[in-house]
Image: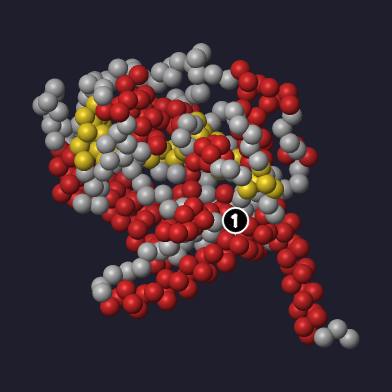
Amino acid sequence: MMSFYGLLGTAAAVYLGCLNKRVSGPQDSDREAISSLKLALLDGASYADIDLTEGIPPATHKGYAIIGGSGFLGTYLIRLLLLRGETNIRVVDLNPPETSISSQTAVSFVRADITDSVSIRDALLQLFDSTGSPPTVIYHTAALIRFWERSYYSWHLSYEANVIGTRNVVAAAKDIPGAVLIYTSTADAVLHSTKFCRLGLDAKYPPWNKSAISDDDPPLGPWEHHGSCYAKSKVLAERLVIGANGQNGLKTGIIRPGYTIVGPNDRLCMGTLTMPRVPNFGKRYRQTEICAWDAVSAHLLLEDALGRVPEEAAGQAYLVTGKGPAWSLGNIRAGIKHVSKRPLILDNVPELLVLILAHVIEAFLFLRYHTLLPFYLVVGRLPRPEPRWMGEGVYLQPATLEFLADIIIDDSRARKVLGYYL
């Protein structure tokens, strides 16, 4: 007769085998490696024949404030505003924008901290010299994107920047007559968690029974939401923005780009291109991506809709994504490798190993924090959630692995209401 420990070992082996199958991703035949024919289409890709202003409204010559304008998406937004001929653009950020933007006569910079209510209010209510009025269109793109953590002791970082910061922005915007506030959120706010340990047994029940998400889906419950501090903070921030619509004449709206925003200096492509060796996991999962230019175009279309059809567009959030079918992550990396000017080494790593390692790292950080906590409290401080020496290794935690899922965005509502066509 098999001993208790033998039964336990057998059960553990069976469970790990099922977990390995679950986390490795679907085995559909249409997820095979991208063909050389499709890769060849990338060789002729160019911005040269693309009119980036096509499909967006013309210049309004209003006053614009871009909160977080020195960041990734904020930089693209300012470039598009300049391309269409705007003349009053204010960058509101802790850091100045890059030289190619700061050198433009239409652009000014005001240093401000969104977590400081006085600082952000002064920055937004400051008058433009050319108009004698404060900016009436406010784009709030600033965020602290700590997507890798879900621990309670790091929550305050995301909460202060993304929730308190948004509350301060909303309060200041209410004091500007006729203002429009557009908030950059994330598809993470409405994406369900993966729940790997359930082994896919929940695949028959909503919301886990489908991979495509749209604005028509019912709200997620607390257990169904992403577990990361970042996603949770964005959900709370969205509520503040939606709740402020109509107060003191303020019009608000939200853009949820999904799933990954790609383009020069992005995290997905640039990370792959710059790493000496690329750990290649999650290859079979299929996702829709959005170009940074399309993401900022959606923002401008929402601004236009808030003025054109406010009764339909205001106080709403819109999912937006790119054109075309969803690519698997393996195919995306194959495409990046194809166009790279230097050889890229893709190291296939078992997803189960990554999942286990992610939990080990999270457990180590938990123990480290609580070991240091008594000593830091003596001097009235809190330890950092992670040590500096870990570098980008801190990203490998369970919350990061929420991206190991089929994520297909249905943005038909944005196309209908906002006129979002690529």
Residue receiving disc 1: 194
Relative height, residue 370 to residue 214 (above, below): below
Left or right, residue 413 beside residue 58: right
Return the x and y of residue 109 as percentages of the image width and height: 22, 33
Return the x and y of residue 395 as percentages of the image width and height: 50, 54
Residue sitting at the far top: 49
Q: Quadrant of residue 288?
A: top right
Left or right, residue 91 beside residue 195: left
Q: Nearer the viewer, residue 185 or 32?
A: 32
Q: Nearer the viewer, residue 87 or 215?
A: 87
Left or right, residue 179 beside residue 148: left
Relative height, residue 174 to residue 312 (above, below): below
**Is residue 40 in view from this perspective?**
yes
Q: Nearer the viewer, residue 120 or 202?
A: 120
Return the x and y of residue 320 as percentages of the image width and height: 48, 35
Q: Quadrant of residue 152?
A: bottom left
SS at badge 1: loop
> Which residue lies at the image location 74% right of the left edge and 72% below the top edge?
12
Q: Please state which amino acid type lies under the numbered disc 1.
A: Thr
